[in-house]
Image (tube, helix red, strand yellow):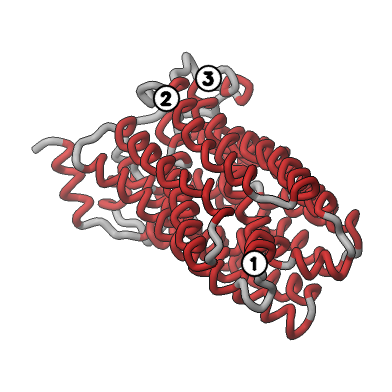
Amino acid sequence: MSAETTISEAAGRASRYRWAICALLFAATAINYIDRQMIGVLKPVLQADLGWKESQYADIVFWFQAAYAIGFLFMGRFMDAIGARFGYAIAFGFWTLAHIAHGLVRGVTGFAVARFALGLGESGNFPAGLKTVADWFPQRERALAVGVFNAGANVGAIVTPLLVPAITLAYGWRAAFLITGLFSVVWIVVWLVLYRSPGEHRRVNAAELALIQSDPVQPAGRMAWTKLFTKRETWAYAVPKFLTDPIWWMFLFWLPDFLGKRYGLDLKTFGPPLVVIYVMSDGGSVLGGWVSSRMMKAGASANRARKLTMLGCAVCVLPVVIVPNISSLWLAVPLLGIVTAAHQAFSANLLTLPSDLFPRTAVGSVVGIGGTAGAIGGMLIAKFVGYMLEISNSYAPIFAVAGGAYFLAIIALHLLSPRLERASFDTPAS
């Protein structure tokens, strides 16, 4: 009997606790996106109450992205060093305090400081989540697992325009920050109680552990952080993140504003369109992970499965360039839903690349480097959007940039890693 057959039979009898861990990652990402998207939903209220200009709002977004860039660079290494269980809890606790602080500050400076702290804390979410996926899932399941937990971003984006306006209209925007901060406290407690590594968890049987560990043996020890910067494989992940993450940030922080300016929606009315858009994007996240995982199970290489899926996503993003010219709200909404779904499907595959290309001991660090690149792109898009809106009050050039970003990203990925071969290291760092 072959080793592959043995693993397959073992997997048939395996427990499925890894999917419970994935559910916790899903919930964490949903909370993460509620916390970060609230400022976009509340933008009209905050501008009216505090008198912000477009450039000042852009500056506040910029400082969140700056902190996210700084934090991501070190959070990956931090997660590799102390592990996902306590690393995730620490990052979660820090960003929860920063989120609650938004309800206590006044003016542009106070919000910029609170957003900076939030960015530092939230930068731990994806390094911890992707490291957890690398620890708990074999390669052939990772894109689906990433797609599932990344779908939490869309659930957070769906919940926010429904929950936050209701709280704000009833109790004011300051109370909205305080009340939503309580969700995080519950999650931290549940995470610390339920999470252990697969080899130590009593809910994981021998068959599931064999499935989780079915990939080829990987080198032990930590990889030298500085050495990662010299690897083409690191930049094969980081450059596409730099090009595509800013587009998602733009939608997250400015889509309510676009709907308000183009179609006259406000805090009471933009909830249903946003829900439709993000429900569609939620489906895209799971579908994108499923498609490449299905292709790999059918015999396709990771290189073929990931890149073909991502190329299809780039094609689906392209219609965003015509959205500013569409006069009907309910023609624009499904198009925006397709575009955001394509982004999330693209992202589900891009986020698997660190675990495809690097050993588990380096995944968190590579994710951190890529996250920093994406956040730097987010800083640039914030300034660009603020500038374009102040001089033209038009989203047309902004959406034009969005339409081309994904093609550039897939070209960069292919040039930097033509075959998605694993990075080679002579000896691991001690």
Q: Quadrant location of residue 183?
A: bottom right
| Amino acid of disc 2 | His
- Name which of mark 3 and mark 1 comes first in the sequence: 1
* Left/right of residue 376 with respect to residue 356 in the rendered view: right
Q: Which mark is residue 388?
A: none
Q: Quadrant location of residue 39?
A: bottom right
Residue 410, compared with residue 416, is above or below; it is: below
Give the labeled residue for mark 2. Answer: 414
| Amino acid of disc 1 | Ser
Give the labeled residue for mark 3. Answer: 231
- Name which of mark 1 and mark 2 comes first in the sequence: 1
Give the labeled residue for mark 1. Answer: 184
| Amino acid of disc 3 | Lys
Residue at the location (66% across, 52% down)? 122
Residue 106, compared with residue 1, is above or below; it is: below
Asked if residue 202 can be seen in this view, the reply is no
* Left/right of residue 274 with respect to residue 205 in the rendered view: right
